[in-house]
Amino acid sequence: MAEYDPENIFAKILRDEIPSDRVYEDHEFVAFRDVAPAAPTHVLLIPRGEAPTGPEALTDDDAAMLGRMTLTATKIARDLGLEPGGYRLVLNNGVDAGQTVFHLHMHILGGASLGHVA
Ligand code: 5GP
C-alpha cells in the first residue's frame, strides 16, 4: 500500500482546508457527513493525524485504536438515531472495494433497509 499522502482529501478536511458537515469530534476522531451519501444517513469516521492508509496498513499497534474507532462509530450511530433500525459499518480496502481515499475511514450507513451484501 502506498505511503500516506498528507494532501489527501480527509487530511485537508482535518485541517479545515475543505469544509465538512461534522457530526462528532473528540481528541482522537472526527466524523462528518459523506458528500455523496449512499444511504439516508452516511457518515465517515476518521482518526486525526497521519492515519493508516487503510485496513491493509493496520498493525498490531493500531488494534486498540481500531477498537475505540468501532465503539465511537456505534455511539455516533446511536446519537444519530440509527440504532433501533440498525446500521452498517464499512471499511473499504483497495481498488476492488472502491477505496478512493487513503486515510483510514469507517463508513456509518443507515436510515433505510440497506440490503444484504455479505
Ligand atoms: P472510500 O470509497 O474510499 O471507502 O470512501 C471515500 C468516501 O469519501 C466516499 O464515500 C466519498 O463520497 C467521500 N468523499 C470524497 N470526497 C469527499 C469530500 O470532499 N467531502 C466529504 N464529506 N466526503 C468526501
Image (spheres, rainbow, N blue to C red):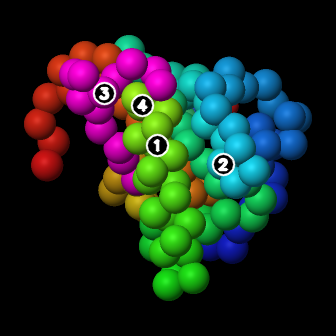
Marks 2/4: CA–CA distance: 14 Å
Residue 100 in view: no
**Residue depicted at 46% across the width and 21% down the height:** 80
As for residue 87 lying within the magenta part, the answer is: yes
Marks 4/1: CA–CA distance: 6 Å
Q: Would you say the residues marked 4 and 1 are in contact, meaning their CB atoms lie under 8 Å apart?
A: yes
Front-most of 28 and 35? 28
Identity, as a three-letter code, of the amino acid under mark 4:
Ala
Magenta residues, dominant SS class: loop
Q: Would you say the residues marked 3 and 4 are in contact, meaning their CB atoms lie under 8 Å apart?
A: yes
Identity, as a three-letter code, of the amino acid under mark 3:
Glu
Crowdedness of circle 2 by 10 Å Cα count: few (<14), some, many (20+)?
Answer: some
> Vertically, is 116 above or below 110?
below
Image coords of residue 61 (percent x, y): 57, 82
Magenta residue span: 79-91
> Vertically, is 54 above or below 72?
below
Marks 3/4: CA–CA distance: 6 Å
The residue where tag 4 is placed is: 77
**Residue depicted at 49% across the width and 64% down the height:** 66
Disc nearest the viewer among 3 and 2? 3
Q: Which numbered circle lies on residue 29?
A: 2
Report the number of numbered marks. 4
Marks 1/2: CA–CA distance: 10 Å
Sequence order check: which comes first, mark 1 or mark 2?
A: 2
Front-most of 53 and 42? 42
The residue where tag 1 is placed is: 73
Image coords of residue 20 (percent x, y): 72, 25
Image coords of residue 23 (percent x, y): 62, 26
Crowdedness of circle 4 by 10 Å Cα count: few (<14), some, many (20+)?
Answer: many
